[in-house]
Amino acid sequence: MLKIRNLTVAVHGTQILNGLSLEVPAGEVHAIMGPNGAGKSTLSYALAGRPNYEVLGGTATLNGEDILSMEPEIRAAYGLFLSFQYPLEIPGVPTLTFLRTALNEQRKTRGEEEVSAPAFMRMAREAAKRLQISDEMLKRPLNVGFSGGEKKRMEIFQMELLAPKFMILDETDSGLDIDALRVVSDGVNHMRAPDRAMLVITHYQRLLDYIKPDKVHVLVAGRIAESGGADLALELEKNGYDKYEVAA
Amino acid sequence: MALTNALPDIFAPTKVGARARDYFSQNGLPNKRNEDFHFTDLSRGLSQETENAIIFEENPAPIAEIEMRLFEDRIEVIGQKIGVCVEETAPNLDRDVFQKLIGGMTRFSKKIVIDANCNVAVSIIRFPNSRANIEIAVGENATLNLVEKQICGGGLSSFSCSISQAENSQVQVQTQLLGNGVDLSLIKASLESGANYSEILMASGGKMVRRNLEIKLQGEGAKAEFGGVYLLANSHFDFSSNIEHLHPNCTSHEVMRGVVANGAHAVFQGKILVARDAQKTMGNMEHRALMLEDGARVNAKPTLEIYADDVECSHANTIGALDESALFYMQSRGITKASAKALLTQAFLAQVFDAISDEAAKNEILGKVEIVLRGLIK
């Protein structure tokens, strides 16, 4: 599914990723853990195509297609979704208008038919119920005046409606209390499917109690320092990242 | 300095026109040295060769009970209503150079008198090259729904509309300035006690477009509201407003938002004047501009001139660009950059009309905004 080889990325001239390689097969959930400044968010932004994240070398393919050469919106239409660590507020654009535009533009890019307003409303209602999102929230401009937890739930809500193939969750657990964490995790687990895969970026093992990873990777100084099973997260929680940083 | 033979041939063959020609031959046309025209050099705009206007003679069905069609060579009045009478008049515009200029250019003039308690819809359709003056007297408790539409087509046009509102009269104005030539226009309204004036405006700018809004709140509890948007690309639009609070307990609320693309020049000059006696005035004014590209220009000059001591007045002014992070966020969800820009820009402009209760008028303007935006955003 997602194959990253030797990815080197600079942000405003500073090299952050130093030849990172990673493979996430379809149907799997991989977690990336690592200390602050290791390049976790840089990886997610580079994959999503954020301006000023300059790819200096390496490749990233999704189902064999080179995604790094695509515009961000084409990557999205191709099935990539990034759940932002800090979702942005979009003043004046009602949540449902935003999402219907996004869904239909993606479908247009893929050469599919647009989803009608009533069909979209049905999809939205169903997903909203599962994520405990009120009608009132859906009418408000996207994320404007939402709490941190509401914004994260809204990210997962968007993810459900857009139904991507590959999902990157960038510190989705930050700012969530235990109840919100459960709602968000349920939403994420609902998306697991044999033809989908997921990269879960987190500081804390806690999230991985709810979203069980198939593999855990340790990202230090811009590359993968170690990969292992779910147990690796527990070990990191206990011993921290010191041994990798010394080695790096 | 300026000589008669240096003046462009813009004055009408009327008495007022002759007086204006004399005045401007002695004083010159308003230019950058005049503070009110610092950002819009009328002398230059009016001296340029004007391209030939595209003249429309279409005959669409009138959109209101009374329709005034302003042409280069005549005013046509269509429709009638009991309680409303249309008379001949001459422009009475002498307060400042802009008024003198517009008065002098005016070829045709009409006056509409609306009786007390009468309720009427009037549309004014301005065709290219028309230079007309309309006076409207709105009686006590009367209601006027006024639409002013300028048809695009270039050329040189002028328009003035003076509205005098008797006690408790209501005036709602919807303005569409879509001409793309040189255009000078002026709306004056004077409000007696309990009168209400509200206007929504949309402008696309032209070769040189200047619009003045002059409101006098001169009776207890009079209220004026204005919400406007401009969308400019390779065009110029200058909006200057002067709201005078002359009596206690009056309210004014003015919001203007605009977007400028490459080669555009927008000017906003807003003034609130509060006279010494006008205690308990509430006056606020807001202007926000969005620059879509480099190579666009916005000048803004908000002014508060307050002589009373118990008032609430405010002004806000911002000029900025679209938030790049928000654009990327939207793109990451599959929305193209152009659509993302259009959505954000439209949302930015639509907020001007949040408070407008007239849904039909609001939707018409928003529909036009969407069409113009599509051409503006690449």
Image (cartoon, coloured by chain):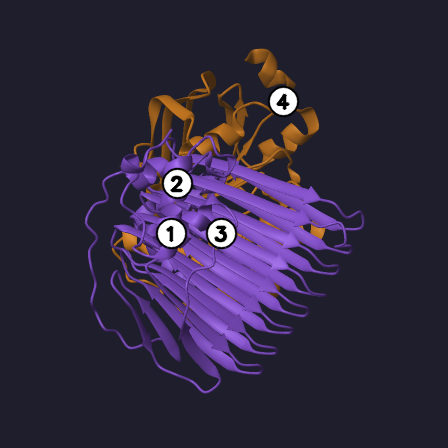
Chain colours: A orange, B purple
Q: Which amino acid does label 1 sit on?
A: Gly
Mark 1 highlights which residue? B104
The residue mark sitting in front, 4 or 2, is: 2
Q: Would you say the residues marked 1 and 3 are in contact, meaning their CB atoms lie under 8 Å apart?
A: no
Where B274 falls versus B195 (above or below)?
above
User: Residue A150, how many percent across, how many down?
Assistant: 63, 52
Q: Which amino acid does label 3 sit on?
A: Asp
Earlier residue among tags 1 and 2: 2
> Mark 4 Cα within 10 Å, few/some/many (few <14, many 20+)?
some
Q: What residue type is labelled 4?
A: Tyr
Relative to the observer, which residue lies in front, B161 or A57? B161
Q: Would you say the residues marked 4 and 3 are in contact, meaning their CB atoms lie under 8 Å apart?
A: no
User: Residue B336, how many percent across, how many down?
Assistant: 35, 46
Q: Would you say the residues marked 1 and 2 are in contact, meaning their CB atoms lie under 8 Å apart?
A: yes
Earlier residue among tags 3 and 2: 2
Which quadrant of the figure contains the N terminus of chain A?
A: top left
The residue at 51%/53% (across/down) is B213
Mark 2 highlights which residue? B24
Where A86 falls versus B88 (above or below)?
above
Mark 4 highlights which residue? A241
Mark 3 highlights which residue? B94
The residue at 40%/61% (across/down) is B133
* Subunit that carries the residue with mark 3: B
Query: Distance between the Cα atoms at labels 4 and 1?
Result: 82 Å
Circle 1 SS class:
helix
Query: Distance between the Cα atoms at labels 3 and 2?
Result: 13 Å
* Subunit that carries the residue with mark 2: B
